[in-house]
């Protein structure tokens, strides 16, 4: 009987441990989401005011460089597919149209 009692206790411990580890991971996920939000707020302030805390300036510059690269790559994708962005509604349109099929806006 002592043996069965011991097995039962081990099973309970395993269930408890799994639950607690799951809770810890949930809290870690929450913290990481908040870190991301803090980072976004810092970057938004950097974009708006063009400055950031000295410790964070390098990170903001790196994000800006990555964003610039994304824009450059997106333009390349459009160029390859023969498309451009409408100057009025910002939707994707054929590069050779004079008027946007979505909003009717005249293109350059
Ligand atoms: Zn348009």
Image: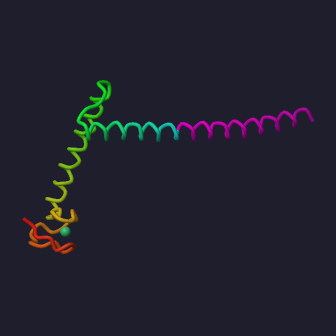
Position in image of residue 26 (x %, y %) = 57, 41
Q: On the rendered structure, is 23 left or right of 107?
A: right
Query: Horizontal placement of 14 versus 78: left or right?
Result: right
Quarter of the rendered image showing ligand 1: bottom left
User: Seen from this angle, which residue lies furthest front?
Assistant: 49
Asked whether 89 or 5 is in front, the reply is 89
Residue pictured at 75% horizontal, 35% vertical: 13
Q: Main secondary structure of the magenta part?
A: helix
Question: What residue is drawn where x is 41% and y is 39%?
Answer: 36
Give the residues in magenta.
Answer: 1-28
Please report the residue visible at 26 percent of the width from the left and 35 percent of the height from the top: 62
Q: Is residue 60 left or right of residue 24?
A: left
Image quadrant occupied by the C terminus: bottom left
- The N terminus - image quarter: top right
Residue nearest the observer in this picture, 17 or 99: 99
- The percent position of residue 30, horizontal first and vertical second, equals 52, 40
Quarter residue 23 falls in: top right
Which residue occupies 31% across, 41% down? Answer: 44
As drawn, which residue projects farthest toward the left?
108
């Amino acid at each position: 009987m002592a043996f069965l009692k011991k097995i039962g206790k081990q099973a309970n411990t395993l269930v408890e441990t799994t639950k607690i580890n799951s809770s810890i991971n949930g809290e870690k996920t929450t913290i990481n989401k908040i870190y991301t939000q803090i980072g976004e707020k810092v970057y938004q302030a950097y974009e708006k005011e063009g400055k950031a805390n000295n410790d964070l300036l390098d990170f903001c510059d790196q994000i800006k460089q990555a964003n610039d690269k994304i824009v450059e790559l997106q333009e390349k994708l459009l160029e390859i597919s023969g498309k451009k962005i409408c100057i009025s509604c910002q939707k994707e349109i054929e590069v050779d149209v004079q008027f946007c099929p979505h909003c009717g806006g005249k293109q350059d």
